């Protein structure tokens, strides 16, 4: 994902308007759920991620949730929770959480914009990129723990810090 090159002229542009422009430029499927919320489908290498961004005027933050289905067997929940803890320890921005009732894994992140700060297109692009990249990075490890016989430590060993070059 490259950075959206366009800078917005208006200083008072709503963060969700920026996200909508980003989604249009990337040709992502999206739905403007409300004035303060947008939902998108972003194709990754492992799966399509459901990405939702919502502006909270009260908290002055732009919240992002990048989710995918995850319904592990009950006997694997303790190991998966350990894998989530280990993955979160490797994430500088955001954190994973399992929502068993919804059968979803979510990566959550928020951009604090207190004091009237405005989000830039580059910040929002990076926020979405970081969320999808984190899901791509840890998805195989979560799968190995939930449906394989790998320990959380072994499974997380496959989650690379950064890939260089091409295979």
Image: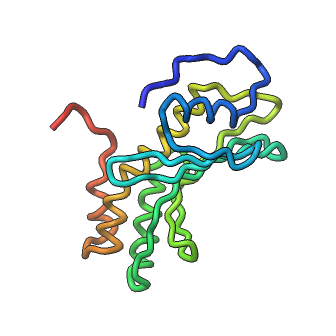
Q: Is residue 152 found left or right of 36 in the rendered image?
A: left
Q: Is residue 158 left or right of residue 66?
A: left
Q: Is residue 43 or residue 81 the one in the foreground?
A: 43
Please give left or right for residue 159 compared with residue 109 in the image: left
Of the 4 image quadrants, the one containing the N terminus is top left
Question: From the viewer's perspective, is 54 left or right of 47?
Answer: right
Where is residue 139 drawn, in percent x and y? 37, 58
Does 145 appear above or below 88? below
Quadrant showing the C terminus: top left
The residue located at (26%, 73%) in the rendering is 148
- Name the residue rendered at 40%, 82% in the picture: 73
Give the quarter of the image for residue 140: bottom left
Q: Quadrant of residue 161?
A: top left
Residue beneath the point at 19% across and 34% down: 166
- How far across and how far down the image is residue 141, in percent? 32, 61
Residue 50 is situated, as x and y percent measured from the top left of the image, at 52, 53
Tell which of 151 and 74 is nearer to you. 74
Q: Give the image location of residue 146, x and y in percent.
A: 35, 73
Residue for point 38% across, 80% down: 76
| Residue that lies at the very extreme toward the bottom in this rendered image | 75
Colour convention of the picture: rainbow
The extreme top residue here reads 9
Q: How many marks?
A: 0
């Amino acid at each position: 994902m490259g950075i959206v090159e366009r800078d917005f002229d208006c200083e008072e542009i709503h963060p969700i308007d920026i996200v909508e422009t980003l989604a249009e430029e990337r040709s992502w499927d999206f739905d403007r759920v409300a004035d303060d919320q947008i939902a998108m489908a972003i194709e990754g290498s492992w799966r399509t991620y459901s990405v939702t961004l919502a502006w909270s005027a009260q908290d002055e933050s732009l919240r992002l949730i990048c989710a995918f289905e995850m319904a592990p067997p009950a006997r694997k929940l303790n190991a998966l929770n350990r894998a989530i803890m280990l993955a979160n320890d490797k994430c500088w921005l955001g954190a994973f959480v399992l929502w068993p009732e919804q059968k979803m894994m979510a990566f959550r992140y928020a951009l604090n914009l207190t004091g009237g700060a405005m989000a830039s297109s580059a910040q929002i692009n990076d926020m979405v990129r970081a969320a999808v990249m984190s899901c791509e990075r840890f998805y195989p490890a979560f799968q190995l723990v939930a449906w394989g016989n790998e320990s959380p430590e072994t499974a997380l060993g496959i989650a690379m810090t950064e890939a260089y070059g091409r295979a």
